[in-house]
Every structure is written in structure tokens, then in C-alpha cells.
Image: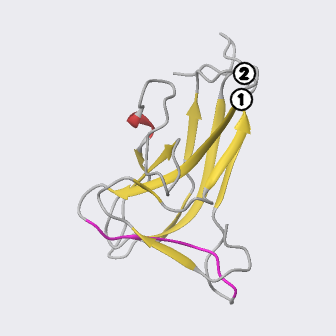
């Protein structure tokens, strides 16, 4: 999202919110029932701690934590970075490993964010001019079934 389009931004609050209906990933669960979700976005920290999560409802309908591996699993919400300086701008590259999916079932999840307290910090993506922001990227990768020798989850 944001390739060759006007730069966009979202100022975070202390409420977990889906940023935009287009900031999503859609996939079919692999035979293992395990995927890794990856995202990339630029963060103007303003001395805030970003918390990112996955929602099974879009921005129009409002945030709803995904139900995997547990019902309404807000444990998928994680602090992604601590501000190293007064501003602390950084690229965020969150990863989630999600288990317990039903093989062959289509899932659609949206990117959500907040700050750990108060408000402030701005997520930024895209641009049509030099020195603007990279696009927002979100993707899923099928992971293998867990075995005792490799791919142990949990």
C-alpha cells in the first residue's frame, strides 16, 4: 500500500485500531495450520512504544483481535520497539507466528496499532516524491507442521 501514491500517515492513540481497509493480508491456511504474518511500516516514534496486532475485522467494522491460537487472542498484540532517542524514528518489521488454523480455509486479517500509553507516534507509508516513505507491506508465509526435530511452535 502506498506505491506511487501520496504519502499517508496515521497518528496512534492508546486504543488498538485498524488503520485502513486496504492494510490487510488474505491467504488460505496450509496443511500445517501454521503461518507467519509479516508487515513493514515506518514509525515516527515521538518517544512512544508502538503496539501492533492482527484483527479479523477491518477498519470500517472496528478492531477485533484474531481468534488464533486462542479465542479473542490479544496476546497477538506486541510492543514492537522502544524509542532510542528523543524521536526514535524507525522501520517496524513485526512477525507473528499463528497456529491452530484450519487447513484449506481462507483467512483475511488487518493490521492494527496503538501506543502503549497516551497518544502520539505516527505510522507513515508511501509517497510520490524523493525521500518519502516506503510502502506498507503485509504478507503471509506457510510454515511446516511442527515435529520434534524442527518447526516447534509454542
In this view, the residue farthest toward the bottom is 129
Q: Nearer the viewer, residue 117 or 109?
A: 109
Residue 87: x percent and y percent?
37, 76
Q: Establish if 144 lies above or below 57.
A: above
Q: Is residue 81 visible?
A: no
In the image: residue 86, left or right of residue 34: left
**The residue tagged with tag 1: helix, strand or loop?**
loop
Residue 78: x percent and y percent?
41, 45
**The residue tagged with tag 2: helix, strand or loop?**
loop
At 68% from the left and 89% from the top, the residue drawn is 130
123 in the magenta segment: yes
Occupied quadrant, residue 102: top right
Residue 128: x percent and y percent?
70, 86
Q: Which dot marks residue 103? A: 2
At 37% from the left and 57% from the top, the residue drawn is 114
Assess whether mark 2 and mark 1 are in contact (beta carbons under 8 angstroms). Answer: yes
Occupied quadrant, residue 34: top right
In the image: residue 132, left or right of residue 53: right
Q: Earlier in the sequence, mark 1 or mark 2?
A: 1
Quadrant holding the N terminus: bottom right
In the image, which residues are magenta? 119-128
At 32% from the left and 55% from the top, the residue drawn is 15
Q: How many marks?
A: 2
Amino acid at each position: 500500500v502506498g506505491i506511487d501514491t501520496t504519502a499517508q500517515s496515521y497518528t496512534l492513540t492508546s486504543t488498538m485500531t485498524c488503520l485502513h481497509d486496504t492494510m490487510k493480508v488474505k491467504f488460505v491456511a496450509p496443511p500445517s495450520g501454521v503461518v507467519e504474518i509479516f508487515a513493514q511500516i515506518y514509525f515516527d516514534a515521538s518517544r512512544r512504544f508502538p503496539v501492533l496486532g492482527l484483527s479479523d475485522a477491518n477498519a470500517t467494522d472496528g478492531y477485533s483481535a484474531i481468534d488464533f491460537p486462542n479465542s479473542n487472542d490479544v496476546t497477538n498484540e506486541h510492543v514492537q520497539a522502544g524509542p532510542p532517542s528523543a524521536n526514535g524514528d524507525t522501520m517496524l518489521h513485526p512477525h507473528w507466528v499463528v497456529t491452530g488454523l484450519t487447513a484449506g480455509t481462507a483467512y483475511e486479517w488487518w493490521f492494527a496499532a496503538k501506543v502503549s500509553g497516551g497518544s502520539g507516534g505516527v505510522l507513515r507509508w508511501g509517497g510520490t516524491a524523493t525521500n518519502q516513505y516506503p510502502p506498507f507491506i503485509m504478507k503471509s508465509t506457510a510454515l511446516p507442521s511442527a515435529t520434534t526435530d524442527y518447526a516447534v511452535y509454542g
